[in-house]
Amino acid sequence: MSIITDDNNLPKRVDINQKNPNVKAEKIDYDRNFENTIRPKSFDTYIGQSALKETLKITIAAAKKREKPLDHLLFYGPPGLGKTTLAGVIAEQMGVEIKITSAPALERPRDIIGILMSLKGGEILFIDEIHRLNKIAEEILYPAMEDFFLDMTTGKSQTVKTLRVPLPKFTLIGATTKAGELSGPLRDRFGIIHRLEFYTDEELAEVIKRTAGILEIEITDEGALAIARRSRGTPRIANRLIKRVSDYALVKFDGKINEDIADKALDTLKIDGYGLDSTDRSLLKMIIEKYDGGPVGIETLAAALGEDVRTLEDVCEPFLLQAGLLQRTPRGRKVTPAAYRHLGYKNAIEQQNLF
Ligand code: ADE
């Protein structure tokens, strides 16, 4: 059983997957504790996503004035941009408890029913990876989201009865890396749908300095910016890299991080100037060397690289697309001239002219 209690008596965050033995946790993320200790808990300490923050502040103020729960919210965008963190901030601002789970853990009808019935008025239910919810769980959610009812059936064949069980008015916050895979009826039940954007280098440098402060790591502004530049616009990556760079600084120098030490540490970690790691580079190289620059299907690529399709699609691709190194076409993935240049190849046309 695990109840995560914020400092200063702030609202509790309950990780349903750990609390309810009937709900299977899909994976144990050992980084989760670290993430929880450095998560900002208010809009003031949450850096970036300024347009979304402004919208949310107004929505929250209006809900409080009306003394009603917040509309259901859907956050989408690449992983690591702070969807769970933002849900926690919203709960704190509303002064309510948040229950956190993820769609793959809601395998059986009783998983979702159990969670819905455990909610109290105004509470927030956060479902991560909501695009992976199965059809039955989705159908249980529709009346729960719309009218705050659970439709339950009892008895068998001729004696079957439908029972409408009232639920407290709650707010569902769904998070997904793939808004396109959500069914229309589920998407339509969210009052607010918002995309989280990649962070700028300056915003990431702020995140890094904040984390460094919490972890008591000394870092210069230039050092923070050097890590930010190679963090792929993603706070989760920035926060992971600062720990690795700090280890390097401690073992090789006196523990303090400046630009030079950050660059040296990141070179040692084989994180390149764009922030690409070896998986990203292998993906691009594979398309260039084996498939003439593409197009090539994602399944073919995953099999050739020995990687999971989902990892390539959810983790590697969003940033490669955003950075203009990869393109998605109806016939598969293609690298761009910028990818050839970045990896030190002559571009496709020059390459062909060699033969
Ligand atoms: N850590 C992770 N995401 C963050 C954010 N948006 N602001 C501050 N710290 C963070």
Image: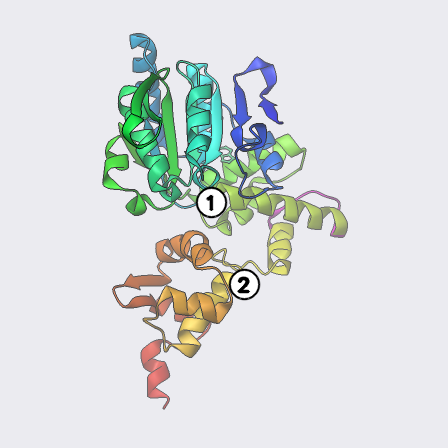
Task: Between residue 54 and residue 228, name the one nearer to us.
Answer: 54
Are the residues flagged by discs 2 and 1 in contact, CB closer than 8 Å? no
Q: Position of residue 243 (x, y in %)?
A: 64, 44
Q: Position of residue 248 (x, y in %)?
A: 70, 50
- Say which residue label 2 marks: 278
- Taking the image as shown, residue 246 lies to the left or right of residue 113, namely right
Q: Amino acid at mark 1?
A: Thr
Is residue 328 in view from this perspective? yes
In the image, what residue occupies the spot 67% across and 37% down? 217
Q: Please check the rendered image and state whether residue 253 is part of the magenta-colored stretch, yes or no.
A: yes
Q: Position of residue 57 (x, y in %)?
A: 35, 21
Q: Earlier in the sequence, mark 2 or mark 1?
A: 1
Secondary structure mostly seen in the magenta stretch: loop
Q: Please check the rendered image and state whether residue 352 is part of the magenta-colored stretch, yes or no.
A: no
Q: Secondary structure at mark 2?
A: helix
Q: Position of residue 42 (x, y in %)?
A: 47, 22
Q: Amino acid at mark 2?
A: Ser
In the image, what residue occupies the spot 47% across and 71% down? 304
Q: Tell me the magenta residue range.
A: 252-259
- Say which residue label 1 marks: 234
Between the C-alphas of marks 2 and 1, the distance is 17 Å
